[in-house]
C-alpha cells in the first residue's frame, strides 16, 4: 500500500514538472507553472520521507527534518533578499548545491553497490557529473560576483583540460569495472573479509575520483571569460539535471528521472540557443578565444577621437527627438539604474518622444536578464524590443542611449574578422542619427576588447555612473 | 578476453533488464526539447531558474539514502544530512527566486 502510494506521489511529481515547465514558457502562465512544479516537488519529497517500508530511527528522522528546515530557511532568505542584479550568481550557487547533493549520493551509494556494474554506472556518472557541476558553479559564482574577475589561463590550458577530462573519464570507467567489482554482476560476494579488504582500497579510489572531478570542474570554468558565463551556468544547469537523472536511474525513481532529464535536455537546448545568439559554436565558448589574446585586436588602427557630451546638451537633444532607443546592459544592472531609466522613459513619453528598449539576447549576464531587471521597475512589456526587430528601426531613430552595454553594440563583430566577437549579431546602433554612450570610464567591455563605436563621429560619450548620470539627466529634462 | 566477454554480456543484460526505463529516458529527452521549444528570450532567465529548481528533485535521492541506512556510520550520517541540506537549498531557493522573478512580470497589466 505504502509503496504504491509512493509511486503515485512520484507520478504526480513527474507530471507537475512537465506541466510546470511548459507553463513557464508563457509569460501569462509562468508564475503558476512554477508553483505547480513546487507543489509536485513537495509531494515527492514528503512521500519519500513517510511512505517507505523501512524501520527508521528517530535520529535519522531528526537529521532529515533538521536539514530540511535549515535548508528551507536559508534558501528562502537568500532568494528573498538577493538583489535582482545578483540573481545570476544565486542561480549558479543553487545549481552547485544540487550538483553537490548528487555527488554525495554517489559517495554514499558506492560501497553498497560495488558488485553491480548496472548500479555502478549511474552511481559513478552521478558522482562525476555532480562534482563537476558543483565546482564549476562555484567558480561561475565567484566570477559573477567579481571575486575572480580575470579569466585565468594556464599555458596550453586547452590541452591540459582535455587530457585531464579524458583522465577523469578513464578513471570513472575503471571505477565501474575495476576495483571491488566482481564481474558476475548483480550478485554479492559472500566472503566478508575479502569484501572489506577490497572496499577500503576502492573507497580511497572513490575519493580520489571525487577530488579529480572537483578539480576538473574548476579547470573547466576558470578559463572561460565573464561574458560567456550565462552559457556556462546554463550548461552546468543541464549537467546537474543529468546527475539527478542518473540518481533516478539508480533507484528506479521516475520523479528524479523526469525532473533530471527534462532539465538536462531543456538546459542543453537553452545553452545552444544562447550560443546561437552569440553566433558561436559551443566548443568555441568552452575552448574559446575570449580574454587576453583578443585585446590586441585592432590596436594598430587609426581610431580618431572621442567626443564628450554634457548633461544639458543631452537633455535638449533628447527632448527634441522623435524617437529614442535605450540599449541597456549589465552596467545598468550594476548601477541599479533600472528605476531611473524608467523615469526617464516616462518623462520623454510625456513630451511626445517615442521610447523603446533594444534587448540583445545576451545583454547582461543571463539571457533575458535585462527583461527581468526592467520588469522590476515596471517598464511596459511592449517597449522591450528584440534585436532583429529593432535593428530595422535604427535608421529612423534620432537618439540611441546606450547604458552600460558594450560588446553587444561593438561594430567589430561585423567588420573585424580578427576580433574575438567577430560574427556575433549586434545591435546596429551606428545606423541611428546620434549615439550616446553612458559609461563609467573608457575601460573595455566584459569581453576585454576595444569598441570602435566610441570613435564614430556620430557617437558621444556621457561619462558617469549610470544611476547618478541618469538622475542628473532626468533633473535636467524637468527644467526644460 | 573472457573478462571482456563477461562485461559485454552484463551490459547487454543490463539494457534488457532496464529497457522500460531506457525508453522512458529517450522519450523524456524529447519531451524536454518539446516543452522548451519556442520560448521567447524574455523568459529565458526565469525558465533557467525554474529548471534549476526542478533538478533539485535530486533531494529525493538523498532522502532515499537516509531512510534506507542500516547501522549507519557517523560519516554516512554526516554526508547524508549534508546532501539533504544542499538539496533543500536547491529546491527551496530555486523555486522562491523563480517566483520572485515571475512576480515582477505579473505586475504588468
Image (cartoon, coloured by chain):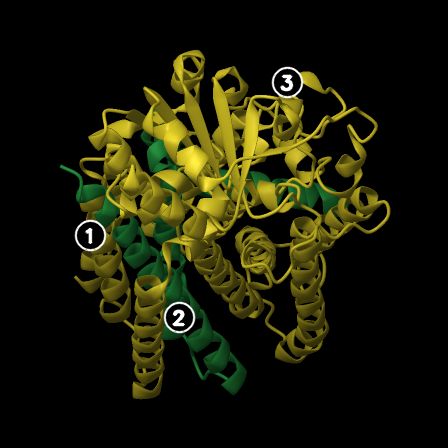
- Residue A109: percent from the left, percent from the top? 52, 66
Image vertical order of residue A321 relative to residue A95, above or below: above
Q: CA distance from mark 3 to mark 1?
A: 55 Å
Q: Is residue A282 left or right of residue A171?
A: left
Q: Residue furthest right?
A: A155
Q: Nearer the viewer, residue A261 or A231?
A: A231
Marks 3, 2: nearer the viewer: 3
Q: Nearer the viewer, residue A248 or B70?
A: A248
Q: Nearer the viewer, residue A471 or A430?
A: A471
Comes first in the chain, label 3 or label 1 = 1
State the mark number for residue A414: 3
Residue B5, quarter of the rendered image: top right
Tag 3 secondary structure: helix
- Residue A17: percent from the left, percent from the top? 28, 45
State the mark number for residue B84: 2
Tag 1 secondary structure: helix
Image vertical order of residue A245 relative to residue A274, above or below: below
Q: Is residue A290 left or right of residue B38?
A: right
Check disc 3: other Cα within 10 Å, few if <14, some if 14-19, many if 20+. Answer: some
- Residue A396: percent from the left, percent from the top? 40, 12
Chain under callout 1: A
Which color has been applied to chain B in this rendered view?
Answer: green
Image vertical order of residue A327 relative to residue A97, above or below: above
Q: Is residue A16 visible?
A: no
Q: CA distance from mark 3 to mark 2?
A: 49 Å
Chain under callout 2: B
Residue under label 1:
A8
Q: CA distance from mark 2 to mark 1?
A: 22 Å
Q: Which chain is yellow?
A: A
Amino acid at each position: 500500500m505504502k509503496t504504491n502510494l509512493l509511486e503515485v506521489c512520484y507520478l504526480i511529481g513527474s507530471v507537475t514538472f512537465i506541466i510546470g515547465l511548459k507553463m513557464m514558457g508563457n509569460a501569462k502562465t509562468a508564475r503558476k507553472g512554477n508553483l505547480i512544479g513546487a507543489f509536485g516537488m513537495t509531494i515527492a519529497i514528503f512521500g519519500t520521507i513517510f511512505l517507505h517500508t523501512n524501520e527508521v530511527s528517530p535520529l535519522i528522522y531528526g537529521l532529515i527534518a533538521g536539514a530540511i528546515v535549515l535548508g528551507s530557511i536559508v534558501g528562502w532568505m537568500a532568494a528573498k533578499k538577493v538583489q535582482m542584479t545578483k540573481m545570476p550568481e544565486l542561480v549558479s550557487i543553487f545549481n552547485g548545491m544540487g550538483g553537490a547533493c548528487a555527488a554525495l549520493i554517489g559517495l554514499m551509494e558506492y560501497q553498497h553497490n560495488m558488485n553491480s556494474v548496472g548500479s555502478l554506472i549511474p552511481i559513478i556518472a552521478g558522482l562525476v557529473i555532480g562534482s563537476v557541476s558543483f565546482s564549476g558553479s562555484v567558480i561561475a559564482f565567484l566570477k559573477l560576483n567579481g571575486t575572480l574577475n580575470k579569466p585565468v589561463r594556464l599555458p596550453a590550458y586547452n590541452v591540459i583540460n582535455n587530457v585531464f577530462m579524458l583522465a577523469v573519464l578513464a578513471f570513472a570507467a575503471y571505477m565501474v569495472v575495476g576495483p571491488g567489482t566482481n564481474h558476475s554482476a548483480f550478485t554479492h560476494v559472500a566472503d566478508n573479509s575479502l569484501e572489506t579488504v577490497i572496499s577500503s582500497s576502492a573507497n580511497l579510489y572513490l575519493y580520489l575520483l571525487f577530488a579529480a572531478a572537483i578539480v576538473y570542474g574548476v579547470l573547466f570554468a576558470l578559463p572561460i571569460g565573464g561574458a560567456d558565463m550565462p552559457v556556462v551556468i546554463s550548461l552546468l544547469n543541464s549537467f546537474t539535471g543529468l546527475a539527478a537523472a542518473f540518481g533516478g536511474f539508480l533507484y528506479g525513481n521516475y520523479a528524479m528521472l523526469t525532473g533530471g532529464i527534462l532539465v538536462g535536455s531543456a538546459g542543453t537546448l537553452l545553452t545552444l540557443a544562447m550560443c546561437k545568439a552569440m553566433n558561436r559554436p559551443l566548443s568555441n565558448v568552452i575552448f574559446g578565444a575570449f580574454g587576453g589574446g583578443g585585446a590586441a585586436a585592432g590596436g594598430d588602427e587609426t581610431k580618431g577621437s572621442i567626443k564628450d557630451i554634457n548633461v544639458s546638451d543631452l537633455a535638449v537633444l533628447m527632448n527634441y527627438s522623435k524617437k529614442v532607443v535605450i540599449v541597456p546592459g549589465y552596467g545598468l544592472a550594476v548601477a541599479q539604474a533600472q528605476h531611473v531609466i524608467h523615469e526617464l522613459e516616462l518623462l520623454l513619453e510625456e513630451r511626445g518622444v517615442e521610447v523603446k528598449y533594444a534587448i540583445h539576447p545576451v545583454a547582461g549576464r543571463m539571457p533575458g536578464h535585462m527583461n527581468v531587471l526592467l520588469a522590476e521597475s515596471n517598464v511596459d512589456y511592449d517597449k522591450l524590443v528584440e534585436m532583429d526587430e529593432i535593428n530595422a528601426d535604427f535608421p529612423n531613430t534620432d537618439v540611441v542611449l546606450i547604458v552600460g552595454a558594450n560588446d553587444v553594440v561593438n561594430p567589430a563583430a561585423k567588420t573585424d574578422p580578427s576580433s574575438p566577437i567577430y560574427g556575433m549579431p549586434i545591435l546596429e546602433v551606428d545606423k541611428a542619427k546620434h549615439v550616446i554612450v553612458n559609461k563609467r570610464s573608457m575601460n573595455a567591455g566584459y569581453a576585454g576588447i576595444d569598441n570602435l563605436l566610441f570613435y564614430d563621429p556620430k557617437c558621444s560619450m556621457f561619462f558617469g555612473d549610470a544611476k547618478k548620470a541618469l538622475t542628473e539627466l532626468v533633473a535636467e529634462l524637468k527644467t526644460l | 578476453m573472457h573478462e571482456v566477454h563477461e562485461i559485454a554480456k552484463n551490459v547487454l543484460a543490463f539494457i534488457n533488464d532496464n529497457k522500460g526505463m531506457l525508453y522512458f529516458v529517450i522519450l523524456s529527452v524529447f519531451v524536454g526539447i518539446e516543452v522548451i521549444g519556442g520560448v521567447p528570450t524574455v523568459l529565458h532567465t526565469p525558465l533557467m531558474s525554474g529548471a534549476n529548481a526542478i533538478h533539485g528533485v535530486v533531494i529525493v535521492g538523498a532522502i532515499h539514502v537516509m531512510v534506507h541506512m542500516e547501522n549507519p556510520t557517523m560519516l554516512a550520517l554526516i554526508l547524508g544530512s549534508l546532501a539533504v541540506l544542499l538539496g533543500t537549498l536547491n529546491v527551496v531557493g530555486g523555486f522562491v527566486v523563480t517566483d520572485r522573478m515571475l512576480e515582477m512580470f505579473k505586475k504588468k497589466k
